[in-house]
Image (cartoon, grey):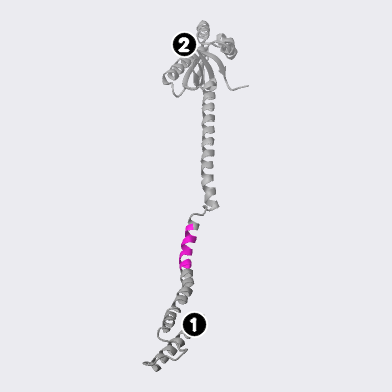
Amino acid sequence: MSTTRHLVNRRRRLATTTSRTAGAGTEPAYGQPGPAEAEPEAADDSAPDAPDAVEAAPDTASDTACDTAPDAADDSRAHEAPHPRASRIRITLPTVLCALTVLLGAVAVWAFASASSLRDEPARQNTALTDIGRTSEVKGRISEAVGAVFSYDYASPARSDRAASTYLTGRAVQQHKDMLADVREQAPGQKLVLTTTVTESGVEFLDGDRARLLIFADQSNTRTGKDEETTYAAAMFAVDAVRRGDTWLIAAIDTFTR
């Protein structure tokens, strides 16, 4: 539409120019437009430019819209909500940390309760490896007691009785009598001398005034009669000891036999 109007106006300008050239210096004929009337024509010369400018405006606007549309889209995408996966990660991490905190707290409570129960149970209060002084004391006293009560001389049976009354208490009194019953019976006729020497001992358990020891001992049994003869044997047994005053006593004897 713009091009057609432009052609029409061009033809008008050409016609006007021709008429002006032909009628120069003469009065215009009646009905013919004079010079003054050509001014509207001139005004029309500029008229075609305006539609062109108007028609170009949409293109410019469209170009501007196209140029600005990606930026606007980018801005809108920049303000969009974060990806659901990222949101889930941000939500899940604090939850996991909270769960780990609760779990560690539960483990700490359990460990504290277990430690308290171990401290409260007498069977768990073993200071055999930590209380060196008390461990050495009980080993020395019990080794001495074992050597005394498990030695017997037919010539002085009272010595064995005194040792038993000095170092034995509780069940150990009757156990000692049962273990040496055969020796006491045969000793006068065979003139027996039984000697027990502790070669090694270990404190298995120590808790305050109670202890349990493992005893290793060598025993020699000598017949001093007409045909003198000596036999040797090794013994291993455990004893339960208790502290009475300033000494340790044997409270029970375990020979590991039923």
Residue 98 point in image, percent of width and height: 52, 38
Picture residue at 46% right of the left edge, 88% below the top: 11
Disc 2 to disc 1, C-alpha distance = 136 Å
Magenta highlight on residue 70: yes
**The residue tagged with tag 2: helix, strand or loop?**
strand
Check disc 1 and give the amino acid type.
Arg
Q: Residues within 10 Å of mark 2 (few under 14, many from 20)?
A: few
Where 160 sits versus 91, above or below?
A: above
Residue 31 point in image, percent of width and height: 47, 89
Residue assigned mark 1: 5
Question: Nearest the camera: 32 or 192?
Answer: 32
The image shows a total of numbered marks equal to 2
Residue 183 point in image, percent of width and height: 57, 13
Residue 63 point in image, percent of width and height: 46, 70
The magenta stretch is 64-75
Magenta part, dominant SS: helix
Residue assigned mark 2: 247
Q: Confirm whether residue 223 shows in the render.
A: no
Picture residue at 51% right of the left edge, 31% below the top: 108
- Quadrant for the C terminus in the image: top right
Q: Confirm whether residue 27 shows in the render.
A: yes
Q: Are marks 2 and 1 in contact (CB under 8 Å)?
A: no
- Furthest residue toward top: 158
Q: In this image, 211 relative to 24: left or right?
A: right
- Furthest residue toward right: 258
Q: Residues within 10 Å of mark 1 (few under 14, many from 20)?
A: few
Picture residue at 46% right of the left edge, 11% below the top: 247
**The residue tagged with tag 1: helix, strand or loop?**
helix
Question: Nearest the camera: 26 or 52?
Answer: 26
Question: Nearest the camera: 136 or 132?
Answer: 132
Picture residue at 40% right of the left edge, 94% below the top: 22
Question: Nearest the camera: 141 or 212?
Answer: 212
